[in-house]
Image: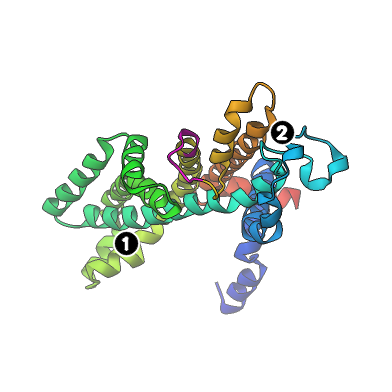
Amino acid sequence: MTAEASETTNAEEPHVVVRLTRMLWADKFAFCAAIFLLAIVILAIVGPSWLGDLATKQNLRGRNAFPFDWERGWAWWMGADALGRPLFARIIVATQNTLMVAAGAVAVSATAGTLLGLVAGFASPRVNQVIMRLADVIMSFPSLLIAVIVLYLLGSSILNLMLVLAITRIPVYLRTTRAEVLEIRERMFVQAARVMGASGKRILFRHILPVVLPTLTTLATLDFAYVMLAESALSFLGIGIQPPEITWGLMISQGRQYLTNAWWLSFWPGLAIIFTTMSLNLLSNWMRIALDPVQRWRLEMKGRTNG
């Protein structure tokens, strides 16, 4: 192929952002999930400054106000809680804490687990055994039980909750990364890099890690939903984030005593959790295909047809 033909081919290839957008548009469920998650992230950023005062302002005359009462104003269309605070404003403000805990826990656990998994899969058998026994110790205890004990002893706060959930999820990334490294290190391009004199650190981070990242990205998307549900469960049990902070799980917990006469207090935050976790699962399924070179062509062909 001549240089001119190569330049023409490269010019005709769309930008990577355009390719990803086309592949996302090819899967309508994943596209809707991405739009919903983008809206959730925007609300988490601007929500507290936009509706923070309204979410904490009490109005005892409007206790447990019924939803869809448009005469009160747009902020009350989901109803009000036991202290007369609008549920719509509180759900938006609670989005930041809910996503902050989940994102922080996933980031810490993914980083620590990936680094330990890279070392365990590439280092000597003795180091591998030590790291894997550490993972076995963590996995020998139920994750929620560890969270309950630690939060009871150290107290409930956003930082403590984030760290506890992160520690319980480290073995997931550690085992996944180690399994991938054990297979990838035997491939020809790794052997070639070793023969050419590349250091172990360079082989790990320049040759092996980029191959492992797609799998870890899909895993992190799924784990984000799991951690968010775990935080909601802990808040529901009363050992998660405590007032005056707000999370979706805490709102469900506060509304459970009114389920018989004010079901909407727990229904709306529960619906927010359901939609968010479902969107994460749909996007994770799309990412599994889009990041796989063997299956990616299906989305690319469908995207070109729809385009």
241 within the magenta span: yes
Q: Quadrant of residue 78?
A: top right
224 within the magenta span: no
Give SS at disc 1. helix
User: As displayed, is residue 53 above or below residue 76?
Assistant: below
Q: Which residue is mark 1?
A: 189
Q: Locate residue 280 relative to residue 239 in the image: left or right.
A: right
Residue occupying the point 77% across, 47% down: 75
Residue occupying the point 47% across, 35% down: 233
Q: Residue 7: image x %, image y %? A: 61, 75
| Front in this rendered view, residue 47 or 65 | 65
Residue occupying the point 25% across, 71% down: 198
Q: Residue 163: image x %, image y %? A: 37, 52
Whichever of labels 1 and 2 marks the residue nearer the N terminus, that label is 2
Where the N terminus falls, by quadrant? Answer: bottom right
- Residue 64: which disc? 2
| Local crowd size for mark 2, using a 10 Å CA cut-off: few (<14), some (14–19), many (≥20) | many
- Three-letter amino acid code of the residue under disc 2: Asn
Residue occupying the point 71% across, 33% down: 64
Q: Quadrant of residue 141?
A: top left
Q: Locate residue 268 relative to residue 137 in the image: left or right.
A: right
> Which residue appears farthest toward the bottom when viewing the image?
3
- Three-letter amino acid code of the residue under disc 1: Phe
Which SS type dominates the magenta stretch? Answer: loop
Q: Residue 277: image x %, image y %? A: 56, 40
Q: Which residues are magenta?
A: 235-242
Give SS at disc 2. loop
| Front in this rendered view, residue 299 or 64 | 64
Q: Residue 82: image x %, image y %? A: 66, 36
